[in-house]
């Protein structure tokens, strides 16, 4: 069996229950579905409060500073530390973004003749050099294993024994808990930073690249690359209210900005646009579709909301 863990935030309310429903309909060998969040956001999954973890958003901000990427770092270590707060969780866990909807029945693990299961890894095309600089600072000698692919997609299978091996190695090297080491490695000067990008430690780490490349290096017999056909609902393409209508566009994660919907109908509600994109994507043979909030809201408003949230939460915790 494989349990599913979905980190979520209030901004994800629009898609969270769609995501959960699709998991229950399409993930083979499904065990339990968990949502990690500050407050309970749905009754359709078991809740793991963020307060159960050995760190808080405020703790993260002390390492990274307070900016719109602080929550992004936070959700990365929440995912990686899941086995530390839920001892009864399955040995293999599918970690999934709350804005991603699976469209077809899909396997994510397979049994082997050797100890442990094989995890199926989806792959993308993203390449960002600071991710790999951070990875090698965290685990010296760990480098990018597959030049043509990235481990960054909208889901990943984590396996308990492999994650424990990674944690033990990192904690032995750095002499502190894994989550602290992860954050400390984001704040030094980076040789791969270009211009103002990743200013003050923003956007320098990827938990998926770390785990993906660690598995390929240390556990190649339990790691299988299996590309799913995934699309991203793109730009200000979805949503609306009574006074606004929007168009739908998409891109393929692996084929770089290829539009997949030839027609761009207008919608009066967000739910209508989601339903259209889900049905259209399934008809075209896709395995999943992702509805990122910033592509509906616009990146400027998304960043402002993130910065306001981190300031509010950290201010509350210091009162």
Image (cartoon, rainbow, N blue to C red):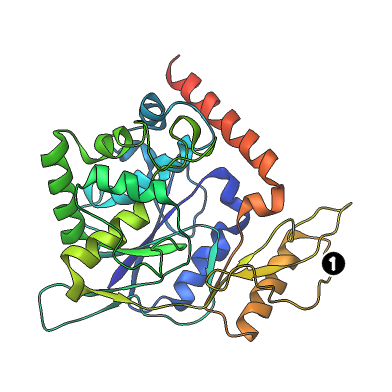
Identify which residue is drawn at 59% across, 46% down: 11
Q: Residue at x 24, y 43 (%)?
A: 138
Determine whether 273 is above or below 281 in the image: above
Q: Nearer the viewer, residue 106 or 3?
A: 106
Q: Is residue 195 above or below residue 168?
A: above
Report whether residue 48 is seen.
no
What residue occupies the far top of the structure in this picture? 319
From the image, which quarter does the N terminus lie in?
bottom left
Residue occupying the point 20% across, 81% down: 111
Identity of the residue furthest to the right in this view: 243
Say what secondary structure mark 1 lies in.
loop
Residue drawn at 85 percent across, 59 percent down: 245
Q: Nearer the viewer, residue 40 or 101?
A: 101
The quadrant of the image that shows the C terminus is: top left
Mark 1 Cα shell of 10 Å, populated few (<14), some (14-19), many (≥20): some
Q: Position of residue 154 (x, y in %)?
A: 47, 62
Question: Image quadrant of residue 305?
Answer: top right
Kindly tell me whether residue 260 is visible in this rendering.
yes
In the rendered view, does 251 fall on the left or right side of 58? right
Residue 171 coordinates in the image, percent (x, y): 15, 40
* In this view, 317 is above or below 137: above
Residue 44 position in % (x across, y down)? 48, 60
Total number of numbered discs in the rendering: 1
From the image, tell me which residue sits under label 1. 266
């Amino acid at each position: 069996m494989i349990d599913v863990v979905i980190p979520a935030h209030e901004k994800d309310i629009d898609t969270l229950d769609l995501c959960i429903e699709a998991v229950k309909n399409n993930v083979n060998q499904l065990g339990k579905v968990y949502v990690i969040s500050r407050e309970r956001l749905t009754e359709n999954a078991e809740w793991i409060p963020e307060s159960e973890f050995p760190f808080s958003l405020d703790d993260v901000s002390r390492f990274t500073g307070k900016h719109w990427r602080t929550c992004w770092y936070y959700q990365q270590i929440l995912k990686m530390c899941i086995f530390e707060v839920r001892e009864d969780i399955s040995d293999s866990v599918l970690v999934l973004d709350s804005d991603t909807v699976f469209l077809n029945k899909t396997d994510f693990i397979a049994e082997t003749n050797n100890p442990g299961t094989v995890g199926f890894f989806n792959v993308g095309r993203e390449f960002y050099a600071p991710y790999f600089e951070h990875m090698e600072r965290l685990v010296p000698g760990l480098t990018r294993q597959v030049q043509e692919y990235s481990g960054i997609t909208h889901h990943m299978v984590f396996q308990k024994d492999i994650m424990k091996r990674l944690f033990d190695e990192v904690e032995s090297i750095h002499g502190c808990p894994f989550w602290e080491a992860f954050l400390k490695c984001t704040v030094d000067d980076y040789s791969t930073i270009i211009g103002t990008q990743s200013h003050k430690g923003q956007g320098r780490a990827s938990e998926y690249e770390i785990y993906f490349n660690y598995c390929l290096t240390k556990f190649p017999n339990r790691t299988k690359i299996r590309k799913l056909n995934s699309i991203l609902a793109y730009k200000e393409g979805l949503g609306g209210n009574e006074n606004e209508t929007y168009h739908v566009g998409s891109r393929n994660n692996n084929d770089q900005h290829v539009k997949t919907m030839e027609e761009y109908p207008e919608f009066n509600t967000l739910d209508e646009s989601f339903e259209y994109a889900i049905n259209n994507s399934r008809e075209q043979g896709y395995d999943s579709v992702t509805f990122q909030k910033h592509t509906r809201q616009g990146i400027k408003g998304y960043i402002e909301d993130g910065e306001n949230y981190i300031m509010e939460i950290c201010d509350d915790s210091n009162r």
